[in-house]
């Protein structure tokens, strides 16, 4: 199974693994290669510039600590492809968050299951694990 972490799941796996659901945690530990989109890192930077995440503390040096942790874990980073940008054009507006819409486009194109709490992904036919 090809698995991608959404932004919150990435942060929880790195900094607060107890926040992952049992099925999400099991999938995370049983999957040989986890994928992370560069879009999630962009989203983290933007949210940190606006005061961070509600109810969750992300270290100020997240770009170093998170990158080191992802490297240790052997995560594969997914860049934004032209096909992903084009895919967004065809997505209905079940979800208006531009970061999540790109993650959805990437999940559909790459046939990734997504570990994440956001139920809006379900409306697009993305297999979501939570």
Image (spheres, rainbow, N blue to C red):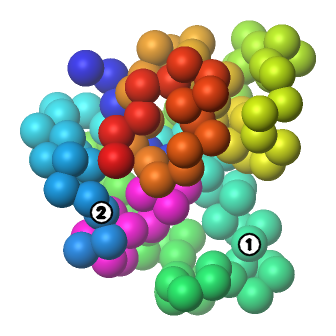
Which residue is depicted at the point 52% across and 76% down?
Answer: 62
- For residue 51, say whether it is visible: yes
Whichever of labels 2 and 1 marks the residue nearer the N terminus, that label is: 2
Q: Quadrant of the N terminus?
A: top left
- For residue 86, say whether it is visible: no
For residue 114, side relative to residue 18 (left or right): right
x and y, in percent, of residue 85 in the image: 81, 21
In the drawing, what numbered circle is on residue 20? 2
Residue 6 higher or lower than 48, as above or below: above
Asked if the magenta segment contains residue 11, the reply would be yes
x and y, in percent, of residue 74 in the image: 27, 44
Query: Quarter of the image holding residue 72?
Result: bottom left
Q: Residues within 10 Å of mark 1 (few under 14, many from 20)?
A: few
In the drawing, what numbered circle is on residue 97? none
Q: From the viewer's side, name the closer residue of 6 and 120.
A: 120
For residue 87, side relative to residue 113 (left or right): right
Secondary structure category for the residue under label 2: loop
x and y, in percent, of residue 17 in the image: 26, 70
Label 1 belongs to which residue? 47
Q: Are marks 2 and 1 in contact (CB under 8 Å)?
A: no
- Give the residues in magenta: 7-17
Query: Quarter of the image holding residue 31?
Result: top left
Q: Give the overall secondary structure of the magenta segment.
A: helix
Q: From the viewer's side, name the closer residue of 118 and 5.
A: 118
């Amino acid at each position: 199974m090809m698995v991608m972490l959404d932004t919150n799941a990435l942060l929880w796996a790195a900094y607060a693994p107890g926040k992952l659901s049992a099925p999400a945690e099991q999938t995370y530990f049983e999957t040989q290669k986890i994928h992370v989109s560069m879009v999630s890192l962009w989203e983290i930077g933007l949210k940190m510039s606006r005061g961070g995440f509600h109810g969750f503390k992300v270290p100020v040096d997240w770009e170093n600590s998170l990158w080191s942790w992802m490297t240790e874990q052997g995560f594969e980073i997914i860049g934004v492809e032209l096909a992903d940008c084009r895919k967004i054009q065809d997505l209905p507006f079940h979800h208006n968050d531009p970061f999540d819409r790109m993650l959805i486009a990437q999940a559909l194109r790459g046939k990734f299951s997504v570990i994440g709490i956001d139920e809006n992904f379900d409306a697009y036919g993305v297999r979501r694990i939570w």
